[in-house]
Amino acid sequence: MAHSHTTTPMRVRFAPSPTGALHLGNVRTALFSWLAARATGGDFILRIEDTDQERYVEGGDLTVFETLRWLGLDWDEGPEVGGPHAPYVQSQRKALYTEYGEKLVAAGHAYWCTCTPDRLEAMRLEQQHRGQPTRYDRHCLSRQDEIATHRAAGGTAVLRLRMPEGMSAWDDVVRGRIEFSNAEIDDSVLLKSDGFPTYHLAVVVDDHLMEITHVIRSEEWIPSTPKHLALYAAFGWTPPAFAHVPIVLGPDKKKLSKRHGAKRLLDYRSDGYLPAALINAMALLGWSPPGDEDILSVDDIVKLFDIHDVHASPAVFDPQRLDAINARHIRLLPPAELAHILGAWLDRDPESLLPLIPLVQERITTLEDASTLLSPIFSTAVIWGDDVAFPPKNVTVDQAITLLDACRSDVAANGTADPTGLRTRLTETVTSLGLKPRDAFRVIYCALFGQPTGIPVFDAMAVLGQEATAARLVAARERLVPASEQV
Ligand code: GLU
């Protein structure tokens, strides 16, 4: 793979509409923008595009901030941090868009329109009937004086872009040359009758004023780009570079959606995924690192990433791959750091978790798995699973009693601090009883945890300590009635 790093610092932005929770697909786009900025020593700008009042969701912006912060995708300019182009929330920039809209009118690139929804609908139906593309027919273009009077008297109108004739073309950073015939492009609304700008006007004005060098966004916006290029030309501005990154598909090759259990990104946090693992997994959705190793830290990715290397083909998100990546990231953590993370996760003192780290680090896929594995150790009493057979299969009551008694007297004599010694001594008892170690040790597992599987049982005893271990062995012993006493 060609790998010539772009050294010119990029100014990029993530411009979500706060219409709900962020999902993996839109966050992947944010990640690519952030990486492009960090990889080139540029700036990452966060801008909230909240001009669509109908789709507005209360607190949607806070979810955006929380999601990006959890992942460590820090922004250099934007809400809460400020910057030279503040405000970074479009609803607070309304007057600006009106001003730029008026400039377009004055230069003949935009016109007012008062067509009613009914008229537009009838026009569309007729165009469809004739097999024509549905486009605004410029009915109002010749009525501008009339509409000016109407507006002066307090009447409302929308502002439309007068889409020029000819072609629109650009060299997309991801997809190469893209061309459109402008005949396919409608005269889009730029200002709505409520005075708010549409996405098209606001995005172009802001990307220009905020000096964005590279617009990195989902390929779903490709059909909008000719409109944006027309606006840049109308204003006499140089357009930024465009990088339309592939959409993210689910394992069934359909657009990732709730159907696939596409979650809110923050749900991965509550499910016990590490931010670094999500970044790693998302980075691979449309980008491949130059070497063979694809388990990468955020720093590694920043060093290797180049937006020019993103491929155009759709990216497929595989939840199992994320699990594998998360597990690998957990394995690679220094034990003290995992103790720290699990401390926060389990609400326990990280110091006290240190001895448990070797028991879980190789066994868990998510942090939540550690809760499951460790909860039998933390619970004060053994919670017996409903369907747990005790004694477990292949072991008689009398054999189980012998084992528990042997274990208890060994623990009383030697404590639990030497799991290997304890295991070796108990193995003698197991052999003398003619049992397989796996069957026999299941007795001890059940006695300590109320279930036959979990973390290594002798190590768990070391963590439980002499007293708790002995108490649990006694309690389990009391559940068993020797054959001689049975009626
Ligand atoms: N507000 C748009 C969105 O919700 C931004 C698209 C763009 O990046 O230009 O995705």
Image: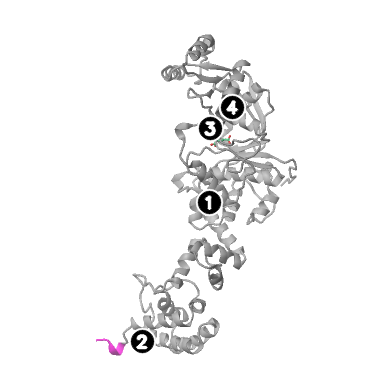
C-beta proximity under 8 Å, tags 4 and 2:
no
Residue type at mark 1: give it. Answer: Asp
Residue 24 pos. (x, y %): 53, 46
Which mark lies nearer to you, 2 or 3? 3
Q: Amino acid at mark 3?
A: Ser
Q: Which mark is residue 91?
A: 3
Specify few, some or many for label 3: CA neighbours under 10 Å numbering under 14, 14-19, or 20 or more.
some
Identified at 45% across, 32% down, the residue is 54
Q: Which residue is mark 1?
A: 318
Determine whether label 1 and label 2 are within 8 Å by CB: no
Q: Nearer the viewer, residue 426 or 208?
A: 208
1 or 2: tag closer to the N-terminus: 1
Q: Is residue 249 visible?
A: no
Does the magenta portion include 485?
yes
Task: Tell which tag, 4 or 2, sits nearer the viewer.
Answer: 4
Q: Position of residue 265 (x, y in %)?
A: 51, 49
List the residue tagged with mark 4. 96
Q: Mark 3: which secondary structure?
A: helix
CA gap, disc 1 to disc 2?
50 Å
Of helix, strand and loop, which mostly describes the magenta segment? Answer: helix
Q: Is residue 344 above or below residue 106?
A: below
Q: Earlier in the sequence, mark 4 or mark 3?
A: 3
The residue stretch that appears in magenta: 483-487
Q: Quadrant of residue 26?
A: top right
Disc on res. 347: none
User: N-terminal of the two: label 1 or label 4?
Assistant: 4
Query: Marks 1 and 4: which is nearer the front?
Result: 4
The picture quadrant for ligand 1 comes to top right
Residue 374 visible: yes
Which residue is identified by label 2?
398
Q: Secondary structure at mark 4?
A: helix
